[in-house]
Amino acid sequence: MLNTPMDVLERFPVRKSGKQKAAFRAAVQGYARELGYEYREEKGGFGCRNVVIGNPEGAEYLVTAHYDTCAALPFPNLITPCALLPFLGYQLLICVFLLLMPLIPALAVGYLAGNFEIGYTVWYVLFWVCLGMMLFGPANRSNANDNTSGVVTVLEIARTLPQLHRDKVCFVLFDLEEAGLIGSAAYRKAHKQQTGNQLVLNLDCVGDGDALMLFPTKKLRKDPKRMEGLRTLQGSFGAKRLDIREKGFAVYPSDQTNFPYGVGICALRKGPVGLYLGRIHTKRDTILEQTNVNLLRSALTSLITRAENTNRSTLSKE
């Protein structure tokens, strides 16, 4: 049972096994019913179950987040979405790790067996075991930012959205994002006609950081009217700032990439490599700032409730 969206953090902190996910979905269903929304689950490939709140057929907006929990890793999944060289460098390090980690035991087996073909077989098997553990291994029990923060923000927007504007929005919680954006791909396939023109606002890791960033897809950046509406959300809010990444290198790997008019929304920290997302996939992922949730709730609600579809927001900047 959920009394408030923030209850997800305490009552359903891990959503990886089938039982954990089912309990979470049941609680969300009860919460959506109390708020007066339609609710349904949609099945997709590989056993995924997407949670759909509202009517997806006539909505102008999808407000989304993935609800599945990632596997625990011995190192953080560092993402630098605005800096090309650190982004590529870290991906290369992960590849090297995957290649070298099985190498020592494989060489040892090959040496002891006197047959390095056997060693190669051991290396090959261990490589896939390591890759599988990164994707499907034991759950990371600390996931306040990735992606409890996104789930909480989606439910907060649903909770506070005025009744008059509810027919404009469908809220979707995707399953199996961590396994390769499977849930959002299944939703896109099932609703291809509707999602071809909907603005998809995808919240992923929004709880830890002062730089709140919007990453629109390439097609969306070419739509002046929609971009005008997003630009009105930019500004400083005390120590926080909300910006749109329109030019230069911009890669944020999340569910919005499966939709033509998708916007990836995240919170980033500032460091030597520029803006970055860290801590996730490790036990250090313990920060979910209520301020970020409230700010994004206000900003996106302002966008959705703009008068006469003018793409102008009434968010007051302080």
Image (cartoon, helix red, strand yellow):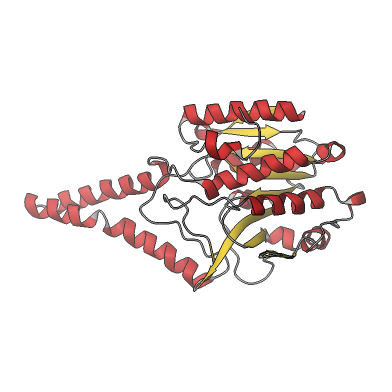
Residue at x-position 77% and y-position 48%: 197
x, y percent for residue 60: 80, 44
Figure check: 39 above or below 123: above
Q: Kindly indicate the quadrant of the structure image that contains residue 270.
A: bottom right
x, y percent for residue 246: 69, 67
Residue at x-position 44% and y-position 42%: 141
The quadrant of the image that shows the C terminus is bottom right
Residue 305 falls left or right of residue 24 = right
Q: Is residue 261 visible?
A: no
Figure check: 80 above or below 74: below
Q: Kindly indicate the quadrant of the structure image that contains residue 96.
A: bottom left
Residue 64 falls left or right of residue 305 = left
Q: Is residue 130 visible?
A: yes
Q: Nearer the viewer, residue 251 or 297?
A: 297
Q: Kindly indicate the quadrant of the structure image that contains residue 41.
A: top right
x, y percent for residue 272: 49, 74
x, y percent for residue 251: 58, 62
Residue at x-position 66% and y-position 25%: 30
Q: Nearer the viewer, residue 50 or 76?
A: 76
Figure check: 48 above or below 240: above
The quadrant of the image that shows the N terminus is top right
Counting labels gives 0
Q: Nearer the viewer, residue 248 or 15?
A: 15
